[in-house]
Image: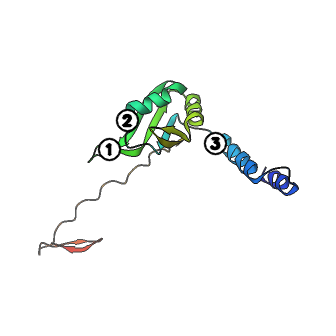
Amino acid sequence: MFSSAFRRLVNGSSTPSSIIHSQLAYIRLSSTLITPKLFVSGLSRLTTDEKLKEAFSAFGQLVEAKVIVDRASGRSKGFGFVTYASIEEAEKAQEGMNAKFLDGWVIFVDPAKTKEPRPPPQPEPQPSETGFRSNKTIGWCG
């Protein structure tokens, strides 16, 4: 596909922007969702779960719409997740909401990645007889 697009550009039958647009559209359409969960980035700090749900409900049956918030301040971190009942509904929402405005900000909608498991927490090192313990990052602490 790239070689034919390059040939069209050299022959003058296409503009560079139309070729790039077609290449991006091809990549976008060839990537299919494997889960009905979408990652939404670029959210305004004022966007709430309810606003996110309202914006995405037009594309199908929503299971969950969640804006991720900072534990300390309670403010939005600028991203969230939307989960649909089916993959087809999620694909429609991705196409319909990607690069659109929500609360005055341009949002981007991508497939959600699976959460990678965290390593188990390391046991706290015991202090030596002198009362000091070694901290590998900083050095010695007392």
Which disc, if any, is residue 64? none
Whole-percent x, y for residue 35 in the image: 53, 36
Tell us which disc is closer to us: 3 or 2: 2
Three-letter code for the amino acid on which mark 3 is drawn: Ser
Q: Which residue is mark 2?
A: 48
Q: Earlier in the sequence, mark 3 or mark 2?
A: 3
Q: Which residue is mark 1?
A: 75
Identified at 84% across, 52% down, the residue is: 8
Identified at 75% across, 50% down, the residue is: 19
Please name whichever residue, 79 or 129, is drawn nearer the observer in this view of the structure.
79
Please name whichever residue, 30 or 55, is drawn nearer the observer in this view of the structure.
55
Q: Earlier in the sequence, mark 2 or mark 1?
A: 2
Colour scheme of the picture: rainbow
- Distance between the alpha carbons at the discs numbered 3 and 2: 29 Å
Q: In the rendered image of this protein, does residue 109 appear above or below residue 53? A: below
Whole-percent x, y for residue 120 in the image: 33, 53
- Distance between the alpha carbons at the discs numbered 3 and 1: 32 Å
Task: Give the SS element for disc 2.
Answer: loop
Please name whichever residue, 4 or 34, is drawn nearer the observer in this view of the structure.
4
- In the displayed structure image, the side of residue 73 where residue 128 appears, left or right: left
Whole-percent x, y for residue 25 in the image: 69, 43
Task: Give the SS element for disc 1.
Answer: loop
Tell us which disc is closer to us: 3 or 1: 1
Three-letter code for the amino acid on which mark 2 is drawn: Thr
Is mark 3 in CB contact (under 8 Å) with mark 2?
A: no
Identified at 40% across, 36% down, the residue is: 66
Neighbor class of circle 3 (other Cα within 10 Å; few <14, some 14-19, many 20+) is few
Residue that extends furthest to the right in the rendered view of this protein: 11
- In the displayed structure image, the side of residue 37 where residue 133 appears, left or right: left
Which disc, if any, is residue 31? 3
Neighbor class of circle 1 (other Cα within 10 Å; few <14, some 14-19, many 20+) is some
Three-letter code for the amino acid on which mark 1 is drawn: Arg
